Image (cartoon, rainbow, N blue to C red):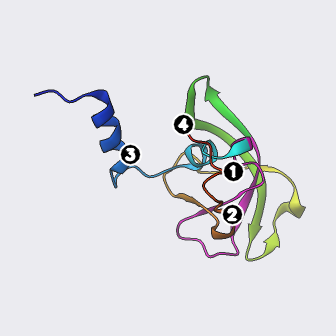
C-alpha cells in the first residue's frame, strides 16, 4: 500500500511536530518578512526582533540561514537600535508578533 507524494505532503503540513523557525516563517510573506516582528514563543509581547535582512545558506533551501534585525526587549531598543545578527533562528521556537499577523492576501500562496 503506497501513498502518493501529495498525501505525504499534506500529512507533514498537518503534523503537530513540525514547528517553524524564523526562515520558514519569513518566506511565507512578501518581501520575505522584512520589517515584521519575530518573537520566541516564551517571550512577552514587548520583546521581539524586527527583521531587517536574511541570508539563506544555500539556494533552494529556505529553512536555514542567517537573519539580522533590531532587538527590542521590554519595549526598549538594545544595542542602540543597531542591526545585529539574530541568535537561535534555526531553532523551532519562533512566531510572528500578534500585531504583524497579516491578512491572507498578503501571504504568498504556493
Tag 2, which secondary structure? Answer: helix
- Residue 100: mark in rendering: 2
Give the mark nearest the N terminus, 3 or 2.
Answer: 3
- Marks 2 and 1: which is nearer the front? 2
Mark found first going from the N terminus, 3 or 1? 3
Q: Residue at x 60, y 43 (%)?
A: 23
Task: From the top left corner, tell me how far across and down residue 73 is, in percent.
Answer: 73, 71
Q: Quadrant of residue 38?
A: bottom right
Look at the picture and state if 6 lies above or below 37. Answer: above
Q: Relative to the observer, which residue lies in front, 87 or 18?
A: 18
Q: Which residues are magenta?
A: 31-53
Give the side of residue 40 with respect to residue 9, left or right: right
- Residue under the point 76% across and 61% down: 71
Q: Nearer the viewer, mark 4 or mark 3?
A: 4
Q: CA distance from mark 3 to mark 1?
A: 26 Å
Q: Secondary structure at mark 4?
A: loop
Amino acid at each position: 500500500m503506497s501513498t502518493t507524494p501529495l498525501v505525504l505532503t499534506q500529512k507533514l503540513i498537518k503534523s503537530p511536530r513540525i514547528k517553524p523557525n524564523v526562515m520558514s516563517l519569513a518566506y511565507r510573506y512578501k518581501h520575505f518578512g522584512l520589517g515584521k516582528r519575530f518573537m520566541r514563543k516564551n517571550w512577552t509581547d514587548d520583546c521581539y526582533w524586527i527583521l531587517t535582512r536574511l541570508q539563506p545558506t544555500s539556494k533552494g533551501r529556505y529553512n536555514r540561514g542567517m537573519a539580522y534585525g533590531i532587538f527590542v526587549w521590554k519595549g526598549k531598543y538594545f544595542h542602540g537600535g543597531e542591526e545585529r545578527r539574530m541568535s537561535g533562528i534555526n531553532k523551532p521556537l519562533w512566531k510572528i508578533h500578534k500585531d504583524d499577523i497579516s491578512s491572507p492576501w498578503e501571504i504568498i500562496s504556493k
